[in-house]
Amino acid sequence: MSAPATALRRTLRWLGRGLGIALLLALFWQAVLLTQVVWWSRFDPGNTSFMRIRLAELRQTDPNAGLRQQWVPYERISVHLKRAVVAAEDDRFLDHDGFDWEGIERALERNAERGRIASGGSTISQQLAKNLFLSSSRSWLRKGQEALITLMIEATWDKRRILEVYLNVAEWGNGVFGAEAAARHYYGRPAASLSPAEAARLAVMLPNPRRYEHQYGPRLAAHAARVQRRMVHSQVP
């Protein structure tokens, strides 16, 4: 066998081994994520990827900065907030298995009309997967990992647990995470006592909470009013 052919075979052999090792590492990482997802089905997360990212950003300007977050069980979160978040973020929450294909189709149509990515069609389960493990960066690799984690969550958690964890880790302002911290930050009261109007206002802030914390204008107020009218029909666990 000629030297070039031998070199080619050697290269292909090493390439195959490298791909095999990469595949094993990828499978191992998915197993690690699945283990964490199963653990969190019964035990509350102490923090999330989003929280760690935001804390690091805050400490760039203030080394002593901290986050405001207080975990509260599902029954101590106002039903108005549960309904408002479902109405605003994922009105088919109880009906899908993690992906709202109709919502994704509508989002793609809106994005095509506007010529930019203005809507993603993400469900509460997808947003939770991203918040727990990933970042807000946009890439196909991150979206693929988000989809896999969403499948893990939907396979091992019930809808009540998904909504409970989401409401406790969602970002509601600069350094403000979870329904309890948000309710006390904006209204000086616990999450259990939020009114329908207050719940609707918090729900419409979720797509861009750090911006809307300081720029809650007439358009957002009108959106909150629409959510408040719809939320009476929202089904929650």
Image (cartoon, rainbow, N blue to C red):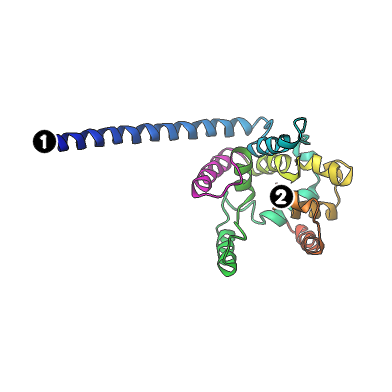
Q: Inspect the magenta stretch and tell me whether residue 104 lies in it.
A: no
Name the side, left or right, on which 49 lies relative to 225.
left
Give the image location of residue 115, x and y in percent. 57, 66
Magenta stretch in the rendered image = 134-157
Q: Residue at x 87, y 45 (%)?
A: 193
Three-letter code for the amino acid on which mark 2 is drawn? Val
Give the image location of residue 78, x and y in percent. 81, 45
Residue 192 visible, this orientation: no
Name the residue furthest right: 188
Task: Depth check: give the residue in front, 207 or 158.
Answer: 207
Q: Residue at x 67, y 56 (%)?
A: 91
Number of the label disc, if any, that sits on residue 34:
none
Number of the label disc, if any, that sits on residue 2:
1
Badge 2, how many Cα within 10 Å: few under 14, some, many 20+? some
CB atoms at circles 1 and 2 under 8 Å apart? no
The quadrant holding residue 3 is: top left
Mark 2 highlights which residue? Answer: 236
